[in-house]
Image (tube, coloured by chain):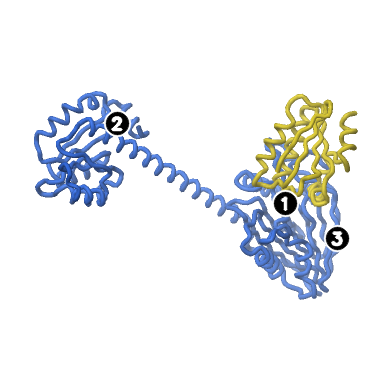
Chain colours: A yellow, B blue
Amino acid sequence: MNVQAEHHDEVLLAKVEGRVDSSNSQDFERQLQGAIGEDVKAVVIDLGQLAYISSAGLRVVLLVAKTLGQRNVSISLCALSDPVQSVFEISGFNRIIQIYDTQADALAAAGK
Amino acid sequence: MSDGASARAARGDVPDYRILVVDDEPDLERLVRQRMRRHIRRGEYGFEFAANGVEALEVLARDPDIDIVLSDINMPKMDGLTLLQQIPDVNSDLRSVIVSAYGDMENIRTAMNRGAFDFVTKPIDFTDLEVTIERTLRHLDEWRAALASRDKLVALQNELDVATKIQQSILPDAFPRLDGCEVYGCMQAARNVGGDFFDVIKLERGRVGLAVADVSDKGVPAALFMMSSRTLLKGAAVGAGSPSAVLSEVNDLLNETNEAAMFVTVFYGVYDPSSRVLTFANGGHNPPLVVHADGSSEELELTGGLALGAVSGFPYGQASVALHPGDLVVFFTDGVTEAINASNEEFGLAALRALFRGGRRPSAREAAETILQAVRDFAGEAPQFDDLTCMTLRVADE
């Protein structure tokens, strides 16, 4: 699992690759929080290269979304593979976190 | 300095370490007290003296705080080598240092084989003796610290074992006898304490509440969250009416204090045997499987829900399904379908459905046990990271 950060103006793009489960979810949380930092207006998390996410990984996404929500920073996800999309749909997290098909869509919406 | 030694030193009356000198040479006591006087005055060492092995054992028996035995070899009544053999019976938490004639390798070898930690030679070089004592005491401190850590670890392991038993004990192991249906459930935890649970709750008018749940993450935090979720759910199920009201109530209560953003996926249904209707609400849980008497099966179509604990005030929907005689409903956690084998393949929903093809019509218990056994056979020796929970509702045949 690895998280890479890119800045697109005031939007932070975090790209996650690999697998996230209970064995590395704490590392995932540290990397994601570290990538986001303080001075951002919006966060887009690209899950295109994420092969698998367990409930432990979902907890980290929820924690980050809640923290950002308190700071009035918008968050969205994009480019989910079918298995990952299905995890978000079954848990219902797609109803509380905005999900876009492509990175371009997500960045365009976040930059507005 | 060990904690015990520093506590003793702090009281000011007892030295940090106690050393028992065993020698039949009467002048040695005076010599030791003189050459070690600075250590004695600073309260670092305290000395006791015995003239032979028998006296030494008497001192050790009445004084359990001796840290080092410094013993000569040749003495009347009981020699030093015999004393070495006897010491562990009296005190296993000290170290022995032998005083031997220069070059007496045979006795030195025997002493070391009998558990002596080190040796010094006669005539005693007190500078060398000080170094030897210091080295022996450092070793003793490290040994005692290691023992204390081991004891703490054992205590922690015992507590985890108790937690596992508490968790297992709150899961139903006797299932209510119901008219027109039967219910069974079982759980296999991946670690000591897990995050899955299920519950069977007898309700008014012959109805039964059925819950299966999976807490995010594993281990102790998940187990604590599981315990409170399960208690809240049972309370709400008995008190509130509809499944959607139960999930809404539990969700709001879990959201009151949830800094760690834990969540729990819950499927909760109420089955009424008189009408054969299952009314349910879903909190982000994977759909149960409905197996018909002919062996065909389909997943329950879910209400659009959300895992509990994620957002307060979420409106949970509710739906109903009419079951038929001989129908079997399998409620499970994703540990079942996502169990992996040595080739990293998932068990999957297709394999679960295949177990019932052909319409064997198992009882609730047979069905649940067949599923868990099939998953175990599939997984083989591959390590499992998720709890497996399976609960079954079997509608009576016509």
Tell me residue A6's x, y (percent): 79, 32
Q: Give the residue type at disc 1.
A: Val
Picture quadrant of residue B27: top left
Mark 2 or mark 3: which comes first in sequence? 2
Residue B108 in sight: yes
Location of mark 3 (residue): B321
Q: Is B358 placed left or right of A109 in the picture?
A: left
Residue B238 has which mark?
Answer: 1
- Look at 50% across and 46% down and name the residue there: B156
Amino acid tagged 3: Val
Q: Secondary structure at mark 2?
A: loop
Q: Position of residue B256 (x, y in %)?
A: 71, 36
Indicate the secondary structure of the residue bearing disc 3: strand
User: In this rendering, do the residues under marks 3 and 1 share a single chain?
Assistant: yes
The mark closer to the camera, 2 or 3, is 2
Q: Which residue is mark 2?
A: B16
Say if residue B203 shows up in the picture. Answer: no
